[in-house]
Image (cartoon, rainbow, N blue to C red):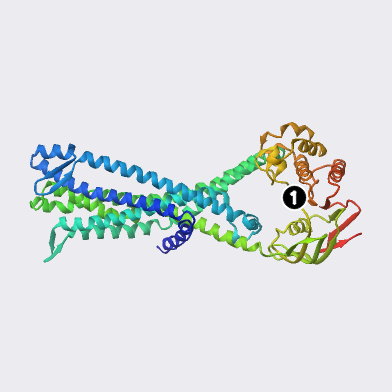
Amino acid sequence: MTNFLTGFAEGVSLAKPYFKSEQKWVAWGLLGAVVGLNLLLVGLNVILTYWNNDFFNAIQAYDSKIVVALLYMPVIRVPGKGAMPGFLELVVIYVLIAVYATYLSQMLQIKWRQWLTTHYVENWLQDRAYYNISLSHAPSSIIDNPDQRISEDLNNFTTSTLSLGIDFITNVVTLFSFVFVLYSISGSITLLGVTIPGYMLWVAILYALVGTGLTHLIGRKLVPLAFNQQKLEADFRYRLVRIREHPEAIALSHGEAQEEGELVGSFQFVRDNFWAIMRRTKALNFFTISFNQVASIFPLVVILPRYFAKKIGLGGLSQIPMVFGQVQGALSWFVTSYSGLVAWRATVSRLYGFREAMETARAMAAGGPRLQAGGEGLALRDLTLTLPDGRKLLDRASLTLPPGELVTISGASGTGKSTLFRALAGIWPYGQGEVTLPQGKLLFLPQKPYFPLGTLRRNLAYPGPEAGLDDEAAREALAAMGLGHLAERLDEAANWGLALSGGEQQRLALARAILAKPDWLFLDEATSALDVGLAGEIRGALRARLPGTTIVAITHHEQGPRQVRFAQAQLSPNF
């Protein structure tokens, strides 16, 4: 039970921001309308129990006029009872209210989900939270599949929270609406010389309490199983996506058997956990289904002695089980909603953990070396860079690079050159010291460039708008990088990260740099996928197209007149 109470507190903290946001009046208005309509349905259910009493009493009295009137007339006056609406009228009103209760609930759901999705996407992308989350490899801080948490868990959270929340409120109102009815129509019973008034009410309470306790005892292990199932399903899906993203590499390596084994093994975990859920659910269903089936006949068995004693009529005999069912059902909400609560608890836990991880990751953006802008050149002072585990890659290094020339930073593979590249870009949160960036427009191109889904034009303009890209300039940039065969495909949409070879991808990224015309261009192994001859031609074309750009190239080869060797955790200038 403590687990559910913790989940409730976390769920409230996840829901609260939306209902305090700029959309709060719409949110509260829709929520109030949905709750109000559901309460009207409760009221109609109360009226229907009294209609049911009058209807069966009329049948017992062989009063066909009252029976027909209760079925077809809008309003009828029942002798000794007052006015009673007809069944058709009640049905029409009930259907209208039920339809709009669902419609407005769905409206609130999609508005809430849209707000949450925007909010989570912003927090995930701002301050490089998505990047900082990926840097940590500690098991306690790993957030698996953030894409699933944003796309599926947010949808499940809004749907389940509204469904369970409104259902809970409705059951509370149902309880208070029917409890007095049940008490008044139950009469009394004498047991061991003690007269118990409204005894059917106490029977309902006892029945629900026993059911709730046993349900939680049987089903409490479903919570961690449900959480784990979501994680395993997401992991399996991620492995499938990896194959879709790297078909050529897998095919060239003839890795199909290995991938098949990985997929089958991953699904084995999905299956085993699902079997555990099935076994626990089977035990829970044995009880809950039995509980609900017995509940349908139990009140009739308890009230029959009063009927045979002629203390109530046929109408009372039919009304009491209906009212008992409403009271017992409201009190047994935890029993009937247990499976939904388990899934909701798992979703809340994943979203709450994701939110906590994003907040921690965004705070990390303030760490690392101090970054300053506005220098004439690039300057490093007492720069120390470490890995997330604390291992040093660079120790109190200082360096000044003037503008205007091609500078290469070279060193053996694995010495931390790419980490230096990230620190220069201001995205590495581990370390200390100071980095002064030069004035003007700076562009950083990693070894493996990123290509968004869309047209070739969009990929050339990224991250700027594609609308302002000049066609002739784009064709010239492509030709300069040896990609003239793509010049007529500017408006063709494709997954260019898969459509192009590794070398073509790097050259397309360099064509993007030519179009951007930065004052400083930082390259991390930007021609590593090219042969030596072609790489030299590309570097020459790049210098010719960007004569006013200072290029800082990080590589494991020594190139150009100005060299900076990256070795022994120090930067060693060689000019």
Q: Is residue 29 visible?
A: yes
Answer above or below: position of 74 versus 157.
above
Residue 337 seen in the current view: no
Count of marks, rendered view = 1
Q: Residues within 10 Å of mark 1 (few under 14, many from 20)?
A: some
Residue position for label 1: 446
Amino acid under disc 1:
Pro
Q: Residue at the spot x=81%, y=42% of the render?
A: 530
Q: Judge left or right: residue 136 versus residue 291.
A: right
- Residue nearer the viewer, 136 or 423: 423
In x, y percent, where is residue 465? Answer: 68, 43
Q: Residue at x 8, y 39 (%)?
A: 63
**Quadrant assignment for the C terminus:** bottom right
Above or below residue 457? Residue 142 is below
Nearest the viewer among 363 and 468 is: 468
Q: Nearer the viewer, residue 322 or 406?
A: 406
Instruction: Using the rendered view, name the quadrant where residue 19 is placed.
Output: bottom left
User: x, y percentage for residue 524?
Assistant: 78, 51
* Residue 507 location (% of width, % of height): 78, 41
Identify the secondary structure beneath mark 1.
Answer: loop
Q: Residue at x 14, y 38 (%)?
A: 69
Instruction: Pick the quarter of the image with the N terminus.
Output: bottom left
Q: Is residue 92 left or right of residue 527?
A: left
To which quarter of the image does residue 381 belong?
bottom right
